[in-house]
Image (spheres, grey):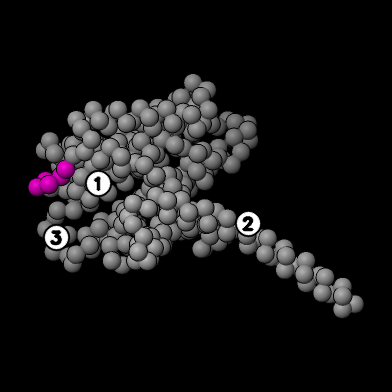
Amino acid sequence: MLVSSIGQGLLWAILGVALFLTFRILNFPDMTVEGTFPLGAATAVTAISHGMSPLMATALAFVTGALAGLITGLLYTKGKIPILLAGILVMTACLSVNLRIMGGANVSLLGKKTVFSSHFLQSLPKYFDSVYVGLLMIIIVTILLILFLQTNLGQAFIVTGDNPVMARSFGINTDNMTIMGLMLSNGLIGLGGALISQNNGYADINMGIGIIVIALASIIIGEVVFGELTLNQRLVAVTLGSILYRFVLLIVLQLGFSTNDLNLLSAIILAICLMLPNLSKSLKLDHVIMKGVENNGTK
């Protein structure tokens, strides 16, 4: 169970890192992800079931996810549609697109080769295949993002999220930076959907429900547990937060809760993690006040 949780945490960490780009760096609450995740899954599974190689199908899932992000970016920057509404519109459209791609509510990979079907991975102990693939993919994604964010283009992307007015004064096209960020983020979400669907052995139209909460939980848990970090360290913390989140779910399930309660439990865990920093500050403030009162009383 522990190995399985680590493997799932590493695979789902891709979604956390992807959402970190928009939610934390770009300061963009992107709802597109709940449509992009099943879009990537539907694309990969359908392509594999029609004879495409798993690697090509996974790459195609990244492209379709990026296209969804492009549409959201265009609706927001060129169509002047509010941020949340632009994401919701694309998310809703993805439902019909996914049904068109799959030709139904779900598609199975039974008897088909996936990225987890190689002889080397099959020779590993049970559940270690997801650990190996997840670790390899999150290392590649994290390193590439760190290298990207250190370039001039990456720095312009960061500045756009920090202060768009200042970014425009430096001649940075903030619309293009926003579109690029949404394409990159949703491309990675589609990639994560492709990998997770191949690991599960199927794609389903409803597998995107609650995805944004799971991805946010990875980010928030990483920030709460590890505290103040540099940007590069925060990317690594998201992965560790994703694994810790899986451990928390494992503990909760071991306590006797039903798997039907996972979305509710995810929301509760995220709410608690979001409240912890404020609660901590309040407790520290109360401690300082009480200490001051005691000192005054002593005097």
Label 2: few (<14), some (14–19) or many (≥20) C-alpha neighbours in 10 Å: few
Which residue is identified by label 3?
Answer: 122
| Numbered disc 3: secondary structure | helix
Q: Which mark is residue 197?
A: 1
Q: Magenta region's main secondary structure?
A: loop
Circles 1 and 3: CB distance less than 8 Å? Answer: no
Closest to the observer, 7 or 264:
264
Q: For the C terminus, which image quadrant?
A: bottom right
Q: CA distance from mark 2 to mark 3?
A: 46 Å
Secondary structure beneath label 2: helix
* Left or right of 166 in this view: 26: left
Q: Amino acid at mark 3?
A: Gln
| Type of amino acid at the residue the image marks with label 2 | Asn
Is 254 included in the stretch rendered in magenta?
Answer: no
Residue 139 location, x and y as percent?
34, 56
Res 278 label: 2
Q: What residue lies at 16% left-to-right and 43% top-to-bottom?
A: 108
Residue 118 lies left or right of residue 100; in this view the side is left
Q: Residues under labels 1 and 2: Cα distance?
A: 37 Å
Label 1: which secondary element: helix
Q: Earlier in the sequence, mark 2 or mark 3?
A: 3
Q: Earlier in the sequence, mark 1 or mark 3?
A: 3
Q: Is residue 187 visible?
A: no
Considering every residue shown, the one lying at the far right of the view is: 299
Q: Amino acid at mark 1?
A: Ser
Residue shown at 28% from the left, 62% from the top: 4
Highlighted range, magenta: 108-112
